Amino acid sequence: MNKNLLYRSIPKVDTLLADKRIQSLIHDYGREIVMDLIREELEDLRESINTSEHEDIVRKRIEDIIDNIELRLRKLHTPNVRKVINGSGTILHTNLGRAPISRIQAEKLVDIVTGYSNLEYDLDAGKRGERYSHFEKLLCRITGAEAAMVVNNNASAVMLILNTMAKDGEVIVSRGELVEIGGKFRIPDVMEQSNAKLVEVGTTNKTHISDYESAITENTKALLKVHTSNYRIVGFTESVSSEELKPVAEAHDLPVIEDLGSGSLIDLSKYGISHEPTVQDTVRAGVDVVCFSGDKLLGGPQAGIIIGRKKYIDAMKKNQLTRALRVDKFTVTALELVLMEYLSEEKAMKNIPVLRMINESQDSVRKRAAELSRLITETCPEISCETVDCESQIGGGSLPLERIKSAAVSLEAGNHSADFIEKRMRMAPVPIIPRTSEEHILLDVRTIPSEEFPLVAETLKDIYQ
């Protein structure tokens, strides 16, 4: 391979700048960024000549130099966070952004956040207000709590609560509740960052009321309950409920704190899901401070919601950590819009996507799966597909043992492997995230809205052709 000849065949910068396509790119994107990417492409091209042993590949890259510069520009200006179609059947998929908000809520959100808003302005009083005011009354009305505030996620909520209520003191927790959440974040580590000392009681599978009583000292600042929403211990077990713990706390003038994790505002057992304690149940049990996630069973944006007795919430609002952990105007607005749906349980079950997906019957999902299967066949007859029964899961660290009967469209991989098709689906302009099973691709329709069906069919047509 004559490398010198290849180096000489690379177009000069002036030649590239005179090209009409490059001029058009400069007009659309600006001269500075186009020049930067021309230099990057030329540098990579020279490196390719230096290291490659395939002359035809290098010559092709030289011929396509303007195409490649344009591709770099398009990629640079394409958001890395993109819409994806969730065909996995996991409703709260942590890797896919957990809870989606509804299109109606999103449209209202856009209208508010694209201009100015009264985020921290009291319109009635005509002076500075508090960002928590937009949803505090809603949360108190829905849950029965005295006061409420919100930080950026539930781990932050736990840290702020403990730093405010138990700094430099001891907090008693059952060993069976020392959970680890995603990304190797653990309750003991969060407690350490809050400057509260962890005191473990009981064993992994059994904790008694007497364990808490015997562990209380003059340094004890609070009793902490952590709801194990992301795993279950079954078999020979025993734990102490918040309701049982409250008299012990009152006898020693201590507050009870409970981290509900994925806390729900609706008793989902009425809709065929295993019973989970609701936030309202926990408040009624006398727990002084409760925290839970906004983007799990609540079905809203990522947030750590804190409710409870006013004296504790007021102290948290004054904590210097609150400034570092506070939520922005997008979260405040989205959370208020979602919470408004909870003023009517019927509206919430209908209008909050997570709750609607959880509650959809298998017969309904089967009918929609058949509809998607027909559309795929009409759009691309060469794709062999059928509807099959399957199971969805709630996911997101919520109800770990719960499986929901569902239905999926099963696609044969054809002349390719299932892994090959799955990768092509992930690399599509609007990626599709399926499940694979024995050389079949499964699209669980529970997590695919009907309005996305035409896009799914067109994407599969491009992949299989």
Image (spheres, rainbow, N blue to C red):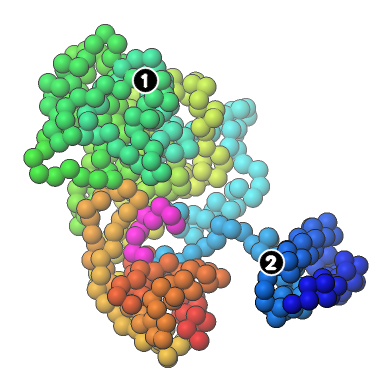
Mark 1 element type: loop
User: Given the current orientation, which residue lies at the most extreme front position?
Assistant: 1
Residue 369 visible, this orientation: no
Q: Amino acid at mark 2?
A: Thr
Amino acid carrying label 1: it is: Ala
Q: Residue at x 52, y 55 (%)?
A: 106
- Tell me how many marks there are: 2
**Residue at 41% in and 47% down:** 295
Counting from the top left corner in percent of width and height, residue 447 is at: 37, 65
Q: CA distance from mark 1 to mark 2?
A: 57 Å
Indicate left or right for 122 with 422 as reference.
Answer: right
The answer to whether 305 is drawn above or below residue 167 in the figure is below
Q: Which mark is residue 325?
A: none
The stretch of residues the image draws in magenta is 88-96
Residue 51, which numbered label? Answer: 2
Would you call the spot at circle 1 few (<14 residues within 10 Å), some (14-19), or many (20 or more)? many
Residue 249 location (% of width, % of height): 22, 18
| Magenta stretch contains residue 435 | no
Residue annotated with mark 1: 196
Q: Residue at x 12, y 21 (%)?
A: 210
Residue that protrudes farthest toward the bottom in the picture: 381
- Of circles 1 and 2, the one toward us is 2
The vertical placement of 310 against 65, above or below, is above
Q: Residues within 10 Å of mark 2 (few under 14, many from 20)?
A: few
Q: Position of residue 455 (x, y in %)?
A: 49, 75
On the image, the x and y values in percent for residue 149 come to 44, 32
Q: Quadrant of residue 121?
A: top right
